[in-house]
Amino acid sequence: MVQLPPSCLVLALVLGAADLILCTGKTKQPHKTLPPLFLCALIMPPPLQGINRCVARNFGHDSVVCECNSTYCDGVGPVSLPPLGQFSTYLSSRAGSRMEPGRGQVQVNSSGAGVRLTLAPYQKYQRIRGFGGAMTDAAAINILSLSAGAQEQLLRQYFSEEGIGYSVVRVPVASCDFSTRLYTYADTPGDYELKNFTLAPEDVNMKVSCPHADTEARPPPRVPSSSPASSSAFQIPLLLRAQALSPRPLSLLGSAWSAPAWLKTNGALVGKGSLKGQPGGKEHKTWAQYYIRFLEEYAKFNLTFWALTTGNEPSAGEMTNYSFQALGFTPEEQRDWVALDLGPALRSSSHPHTHVLTLDDNRLLLPHWAKVVLGDVHAARYIHGVAVHWYLDSLVPAEASLGATHRLYPEYYLFGTEACAGWSPLDRGVKLGSWDRAEQYAHDILEDLNHYVVGWTDWNLALDQTGGPNWVKNFVDSPVIVDAERDVFYKQPSFYGVAHFRWPRVLLYMSFLNRRRSLLFFILRSLRMTSVCSKFLWEGSQRVGVSASGKTPLEFAAFVRPDGSVALVVLNRSSSAIQFEVWDPAVGYLPCTAPAHSLLTVAWNTH
């Protein structure tokens, strides 16, 4: 039996007259009134020793993975910020720490640390839209290769309140290289009206309907009788399972790799090829309607897309002998296709509010691509943002690409739509336990966020131990690697590289029957109670200014969250521990240490 502190018993007496609303994100959902003692248990900060520890396994690289199975997975659980005057820290490191929690005391005077990070909350920048990963065919295959219990654990790690709270899921529109075969949704030549358009088995049986669903864990969703899944009464849609675990609606993002071969100049899904004809012609209009039909078919399963990109890596389709699916566009061609075909088709469809993101390619194409597309008023009116990939980032500085694009077109947001480790020929495939790759992730996210990017999307949510399946053997790494034979999955260091930025929020709010019960606020403040808060960044968090007192190897970014608390993420890629202090004029000095090769999140209340 849990022993409740006296302050909690006092609070319980007061709360008997209050209504409780459990609120996730910005959407308030009323729940049944909770018993006061249970409410108190929710509000009281959880003990630090109550976390699930990582089951570490070493595969011979520079760090460890955390092994999870159908009954156990590591996790911090709900995070509660301490009262004013204290701060929380969460540490992951090459030495083996994984989201290790800690507490510190805010100081009135400086500690004299060699490095001071000064917060400037009056310097306000972009607001965060979300973080996520891609539900490719390969990811779905690997998730479904596990038992029902292990599937649930894996999905919880990504989408639930105890996980890292992904809110964005990128979905390939038909096949990509991380499929087991080549296919589109309209492979009948000459079908310009798309009468034979149909989702593939990969959509229906994996992304939308899952054959290994845990039917006892949650009831199957309702699907239309005309849908392909209606014949399988116990199939549970994989994306809907993720949605059911999420405290907020998932933002689905669709990206197409190739148009059907009969619409293309090369008559094939792979290699160098673009759409036949000219923008405004029947091929271009059919390709625009293809997107609309995709949205309509997924809508039959109650899956609505937040955004579409104009096509994955259009520069790839301009390369001779490109090895997998691609559709070439020059920026001028993409501009005209959006203005004449995609934009009008989407605006007149049943999904007129779906966002359109241009580029969906490497940032080295910026700002030129943005100048061509967004510089045209006819195309720009249909565009909401610019999608960027992380490959070849070392060839162009972030300031010269991302920063320049933001300054030219500040009304259009920048969004990271693809990143993965193990793609380079010099460092290929899966490396179980690679801390270096976690640092690559954290560095890229910090660099992006410090240059106006509002969200970041990883590539495959899960892969097997070879980095696939991939029909062209383009094997890469993933934050989650599945060992189906042992019915386990491994959370890579890169998983925690994202976790330090992304964790869901759970807030408790009180609604009172009348204003006289405002006495409760006074009692809550007197008891110095804190609400159960998010682990770090959620939608609406705003980047604010932070600067170092001198040259330092530390990389960092600071954010004010919607509740007014602050989160600071610090990356130390050096081989030495670095002592530093954070100076927040609103609260004081926060003395901290970033161990060698570590990622640290510091969070505190300001009022």
Image (cartoon, rainbow, N blue to C red):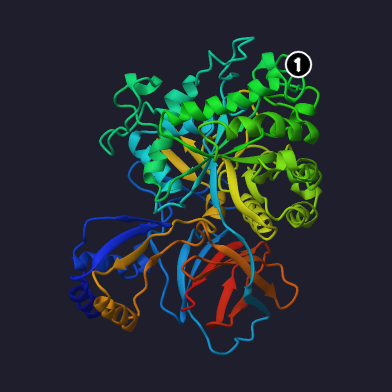
**Residue 312: x, y in percent?**
67, 33
Q: What residue would you read off at disc 1?
A: 266
**Corner quadrant of residue 450:** bottom right
User: How many badges with numbers are in the image?
Assistant: 1
**Corner quadrant of residue 378:** top right
Residue farthest to the top, as pictured: 189
Residue farthest to the bottom, as pictured: 109
**Residue 492: x, y in percent?**
53, 47
For the question of whether residue 340 can be seen, the reply is: yes
For the question of whether residue 426 can be seen, the reply is: no
State whether residue 342 is above or below residue 390.
Answer: above
314 to the left or right of 226:
right
State whether residue 116 is above or below residue 445.
Answer: below
Question: Which of the two residues, 421 or 319, is positioned nearer the viewer here?
Answer: 319
Describe the element under mark 1 as helix, strand or loop: loop
Question: Which of the two residues, 226 or 11, is positioned nearer the viewer here?
Answer: 226
Question: Which of the two residues, 167 or 591, is positioned nearer the viewer here?
Answer: 167
**Residue 79: x, y in percent?**
41, 64
State whether residue 371 is above or below residue 24.
Answer: above
53 to the left or right of 477:
left
- Give amino acid for label 1: Asn
529 to the left or right of 589:
left
Neighbour tally class for label 1: few under 14, some 14-19, many 20 plus, Cα within 10 Å: some
**Corner quadrant of residue 345:** top right
Which residue is depicted at the point 56% across and 75% down?
592
